[in-house]
Image (cartoon, helix red, strand yellow):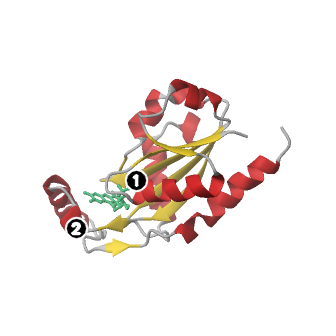
Amino acid sequence: MKGIIIYKGKYGATRQYATWLAAALNIQAVMAGKETKSQLKDADYIIMGTSVYIGKLQLRRWVKYNQKQLANKKLFLYLVAGTPLSEKEKLQAYITTNISSEISTRCTCFFLPGRLVFKKLSWVDRCLLTMGAHLAKGRGENIVTADYNDVQREHLSDIIKMVRDLNKVPA
Ligand SMILES: Cc1cc2nc3c(=O)[nH]c(=O)nc-3n(C[C@H](O)[C@H](O)[C@H](O)COP(=O)(O)O)c2cc1C
């Protein structure tokens, strides 16, 4: 089966996972918007990768725009975020609030830990993060502003296994 990875992130975490996946599965990883029509058309399965900023998925517009092209394809989605993996409901809600149910219900979803290097953020993102954390505190929630990095290849073992199993199924 033919597959492609379409990803969108901002500071490299989502791209890093896409690069590892592409190497493990021997398929191409393309930044959202840079794919050709035939690359999408020819794919039997699509792995979509996105990070989240203030509750919004980086890939949400791409998914909406390409909704028709995604029909009849096997869909995977990996979400890279700062929210701890233990907060499954919150992570799941990012998907249901950003992606139409027609698509989200057909996606096999994976949640992957991200990376934050405060000094590398644009000043807009620094402000947004600081303000977001402040507002979240008022709601009794916690948004991490300190640096973290848990982007590791090992986190991809489930998705790699599932895609490899898919390839074993006779057409
Ligand atoms: C301004 C800003 C807003 C963020 N908002 C969220 C958020 O709403 N939820 C979340 O789980 N993580 C949030 N994060 C964390 C990012 O999703 C995380 O750093 C991710 O690894 C970024 O991946 P990327 O480098 O591929 O864009 C935010 C980070 C920044 C800088």
Q: Position of residue 15 (x, y in %)?
A: 43, 54
Q: Dot 2: what SS?
A: helix
Q: What's the mark number on residue 51?
A: 1
Amino acid on which disc 1 is placed = Ser
Crowding at mark 2 (Cα within 10 Å: few <14, some 14-19, many 20+): some
Q: Position of residue 148 (x, y in %)?
A: 34, 74
Residue nearer the viewer, 21 or 146: 21
- Badge 1 crowding class, 10 Å Cα cut-off, few under 14, some 14 to 19, many 20 or more, is many
Question: Mark 2 and mark 1 in contact (Cβ < 8 Å)?
Answer: no
Query: Distance of mark 1 from mark 2, alpha carbons?
Result: 16 Å
Query: Could you tell me which residue is drawn at 20 percent across and 56 percent down?
Result: 125
Specify the farthest residue to the right: 170
Point out the tag, 1 or 2, that comes first from the N-terminus: 1
Say whether residue 159 is left or right of residue 144.
right
**Is 118 situated left or right of 157 in this image?**
left
Which one is nearer the viewer's eye here, 10 or 90? 10
Q: At 67% across and 30% down in the image, what residue appears?
A: 72
Numbered label attached to residue 43: none
Q: Quadrant of the C terminus?
A: top right
Residue 40 image offset from top left, x and y in percent? 57, 31
Report whether 138 appears left or right of 143.
left
- Report the amino acid beneath label 2: Phe
Q: Which residue is mark 2?
A: 118
Mark 1, ligand 1, within 8 Å: the answer is yes
Name the residue: 73% across, 40% down: 1
Residue at disc 1, secondary structure: strand
